[in-house]
């Protein structure tokens, strides 16, 4: 089977196993794809478990031609990764634009905030919702990737709009003070 290197000097790997997820690296030649299918068959016979092919995905190098891709997909019975596919809330394929990669995080924050009616919430209620629900949304993505400042500003703008919604137009306290440390308050 094919190997993949994490870096030039790094170890070569052909598979990664997680709790209930596995990644396999193979060349797009029939012998390696057939060996992978044989591994699946042996695993199913030995464990009594079957691989859910409808939840499985295959990713091809951009250099793989369409005919070869279709042949491998049909042989394995696995669909190809699409550009908009997500896994655990994150895109499977990352582009070069950090704004586009994480725009969905800001959109999720906006949708969640717009689903709530702030007119009937006290400031303490708004504070609890923001801290326990909204601030958690980007946290998972931020654990793995650096989110662009533009996306973070969009999230902050959504929170600001939600906080001041339903109040008079005058903002009595500067937002920087609002989000500052409680220890800094007098």
Image (cartoon, helix red, strand yellow):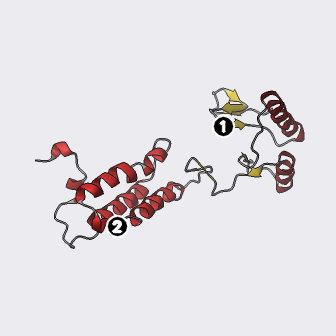
Q: Residue at point 87% right, 47% down?
A: 75
Q: Is residue 185 left or right of residue 99?
A: left
Q: Residue furthest bottom?
A: 169
- Residue 164 location, x and y as percent? 26, 66
SS assignment at label 2 = loop
- Residue 1 location, x and y as percent? 81, 32
Disc 2 crowd, CA 10 A, few/some/many (<14, 14-19, 20+): few
State which tag comes first along the sequence, 2 or 1. Answer: 1
Q: Is residue 96 left or right of residue 51?
A: left
Q: Is residue 144 above or below residue 104?
A: above
- Residue 39 location, x and y as percent? 82, 32
Looking at the picture, tell me which residue is in the foreground, 103 or 114: 114
> In terms of image quadrants, where is residue 28?
top right
According to the image, label 1 marks what residue?
Answer: 21
Disc 1 crowd, CA 10 A, few/some/many (<14, 14-19, 20+): few
- Residue 7 location, x and y as percent? 62, 33
Q: Is residue 94 above or below residue 21?
A: below
According to the image, label 2 marks what residue?
Answer: 117
SS assignment at label 1 = loop
Residue 41 shows in this picture: yes
Mark 2 to mark 1 CA distance (whole Å): 39 Å
Q: Residue at point 41% right, 58% down?
A: 150
Q: Is residue 39 left or right of residue 62?
A: right
């Amino acid at each position: 089977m094919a190997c993949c290197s994490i870096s030039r000097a790094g170890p070569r790997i052909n598979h990664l196993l997680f709790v209930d997820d596995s990644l396999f690296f193979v060349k797009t030649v029939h012998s390696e794809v057939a060996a992978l299918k044989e591994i699946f068959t042996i695993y199913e016979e030995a464990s009594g478990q079957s691989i859910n092919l409808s939840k499985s995905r295959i990713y091809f190098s951009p250099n793989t031609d369409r005919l070869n891709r279709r042949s491998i997909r049909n042989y394995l019975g696995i669909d190809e990764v699409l550009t908009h596919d997500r896994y655990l809330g994150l895109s499977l394929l990352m582009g070069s634009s950090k704004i586009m990669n994480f725009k969905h995080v800001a959109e999720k924050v906006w949708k969640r905030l717009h689903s709530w009616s702030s007119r009937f919430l006290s400031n303490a209620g708004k504070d609890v919702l923001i801290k326990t629900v909204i601030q958690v949304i980007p946290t998972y993505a931020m654990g793995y990737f650096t989110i662009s400042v533009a996306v973070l500003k969009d999230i902050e703008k959504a929170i600001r709009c939600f906080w001041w919604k339903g109040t008079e137009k005058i903002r009595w306290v500067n937002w920087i003070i609002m989000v500052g440390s409680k220890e800094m308050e007098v």
